Image: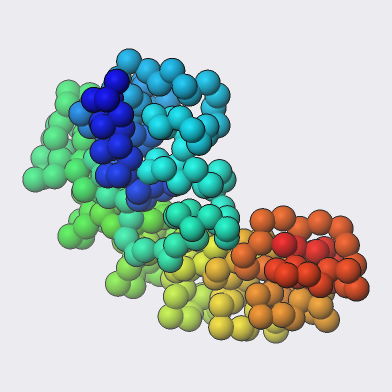
Amino acid sequence: MQKLLLVVALVLGACGGGDDGGPSCAIGSLGCACTAGGGCDNGLSCDTGQMRCEVTGGCTCDTSSGCEASCACDPDCGMGGCTCDSSSGCESGCSCDPDCEPITPGGNNRTICTTGNSSYCTDAQESWTGGECCVMGVSECAEGNSSYCTDAKEHWTGGQCCVEDVTMCVPGNSSYCTDAKEHWTGGECCVEGVTKCAAGNSSYCTDAKEHWTGGECCVEGVKLCAPGNSSYCTDAKEHWTGGECCVESVAMCVDGNSSYCTDAQEHWTGGKCCVENVTNCVAGNASSCTGANQHWTGGLCCQ
């Protein structure tokens, strides 16, 4: 039992991910994804049903699909002991919640196995299994073709274009998917360092954090995109795409109005009031929604 607890402590310390299996969840660690070959760190084995690593022999104190904080081997406890991390959003009172941390550039590079053939699956990062092409050090694989999937970070498998360091692949075209962080695969535009892609147009998707793909506007460092307009989506944390207002650091975007959505943690988009560091928004009124960390949006009280 002491050896088992030691193994658990070691793997918990080695893995810094969150509840949502984000980029900081190390492949092969407790609660994180198994390797492409179904492998896990020492003392762990791959649960093929959930494709995640769990304690070999099972965790007897893990009796539910949620996190049981007193159970040291429970893989549902935030992959790293962050027991207060219980959702895919930022919980402001949870100091170890990775969803509240600054968003790091680059994608979650890993090994991806996908469709291909032995004729094309031949570069230094590719290996042909006889049925699939496994590509090391890539973060996304998208539709494409051999004519376009040719830049230094792209790998053509014979069926898909796998790209290093990107966070999203979305519709676009070769005419617009051309900036330093964009990679045209022949079918989609894959973009590095962005957190949201939204409807927009080339006229507005132009600020330093925005990337027009030819089909969507992809934005760096934002948490949510909401309806709005160019007249209101103008503060330092807002980015107008031409179709939506994408906002940095906010947890929720809800009904409100420009008269009330005005405090330092509120951002009026022209259609919604987006609020930082809150976990819920409920019915209320302006005269009562005045407590610590309460924000009246003009429609709801967020806290």
Measured as percent of width and height from the top left, residue 229 is found at: 70, 76
Quadrant of the image occupied by residue 204: bottom right
Q: How does the figure colour the protein chain or chains?
A: rainbow
Measured as percent of width and height from the top left, residue 194 is found at: 42, 63
Q: Residue at x 37, y 18 (%)?
A: 58
Q: Which image quadrant: the N terminus?
A: top left
Instruction: Identify the residue at the far top of this view.
Output: 57
Instruction: Identify the residue at the far front of this view.
Output: 2
Between 194 and 40, the residue placed more toward the observer is: 40
Between 303 and 115, the residue placed more toward the observer is: 303
Q: Residue at x 43, y 80 (%)?
A: 208
Residue 96's place in the image compared with 75, above or below, is below
Measured as percent of width and height from the top left, residue 186 is found at: 33, 53
Residue 212's place in the image compared with 4, above or below, is below
Q: Residue at x 51, y 75 (%)?
A: 205
Q: Which image quadrant: the C terminus?
A: bottom right
Between 279 and 204, the residue placed more toward the observer is: 279
Total marks drawn?
Answer: 0
Does any portion of residue 271 appear in the rendered image? no
Q: In the rendered view, does 193 fall on the left or right side of 65?
A: left
Q: In the rendered view, does 108 fall on the left or right side of 155?
A: right
Q: Residue at x 17, y 23 (%)?
A: 130
Between 263 and 62, the residue placed more toward the observer is: 62
Residue 25's place in the image compared with 303, above or below, is above
Does any portion of residue 209 appear in the rendered image? yes
Residue 21's place in the image compared with 130, above or below, is below
Quadrant of the image occupied by residue 104: bottom left
Measured as percent of width and height from the top left, residue 122 is found at: 11, 40
